[in-house]
Image (cartoon, grey):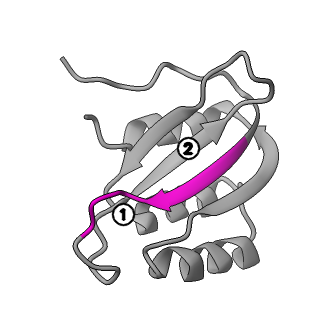
Amino acid sequence: MADTPAKIRPGEYAAIVKPKPGRASPRAQTGVLLVLQPPGEETAEQVFSFSSWKALRESFWVFGFATATELDSADVRLSTGKQPYMFSRRRWEAPLIDALYGNCDLA
């Protein structure tokens, strides 16, 4: 049975995008992880896996989640293959969340 993240509710989250662990080299783009951190310590963070940063970036752009400057900064950080990029805490609404569920890789 596939291990998928628990469905998250619309709300305010911080988002960290980082390269998937175990990559052979920084130039070999094998995907990224999106970690959503909810407010408060009582709720666990949610982790989504994507086959590419490009796919996730497109969702962020389409739904107006991130500015071009933020996305360009994330591009630079992720291209090194070492450093995650954290988007500031902001509100996530149902269309973006649904898009993430529709596009993330199932384990």
Q: Earlier in the sequence, mark 2 or mark 1?
A: 2
Query: Does the magenta run of residues contain 21?
Result: yes
How many numbered marks appear?
2
Nearer to us in this view, 100 or 41: 41
Query: Does the magenta run of residues contain 87?
Result: no
Asked whether, in this view, residue 104 is left or right of residue 46, the answer is left
Helix, strand or loop for disc 2 = strand
Q: Is residue 56 above or below residue 106?
A: below
**Residue at 75% in and 69% down:** 67
How many other residues sit within 10 Å of disc 1, few (<14), some (14-19) or many (≥20)? some
Asked whether, in this view, residue 104 is left or right of residue 1, the answer is right
Quadrant housing residue 61: bottom right
Q: Position of residue 71 (x, y in %)?
A: 64, 72
Majority SS type along the magenta span:
strand
Q: Is residue 66 above or below residue 27?
A: above
User: Type of residue at label 1?
Assistant: Ser
Q: Is residue 78 above or below residue 55?
A: below
Q: To which residue does mark 2 refer?
A: 35
Nearer to us in this view, 82 or 18: 82
Q: Position of residue 85 (x, y in %)?
A: 62, 64
Helix, strand or loop for disc 1 = loop
Asked whether, in this view, residue 64 is left or right of residue 18, the answer is right
Q: To which residue does mark 1 refer?
A: 52
Magenta span: 14-23
Q: Is residue 56 above or below residue 35?
A: below
**Residue at 71% in and 27% down:** 10
User: Type of residue at label 2?
Assistant: Val
Nearer mark to the viewer, of 2 and 1: 2
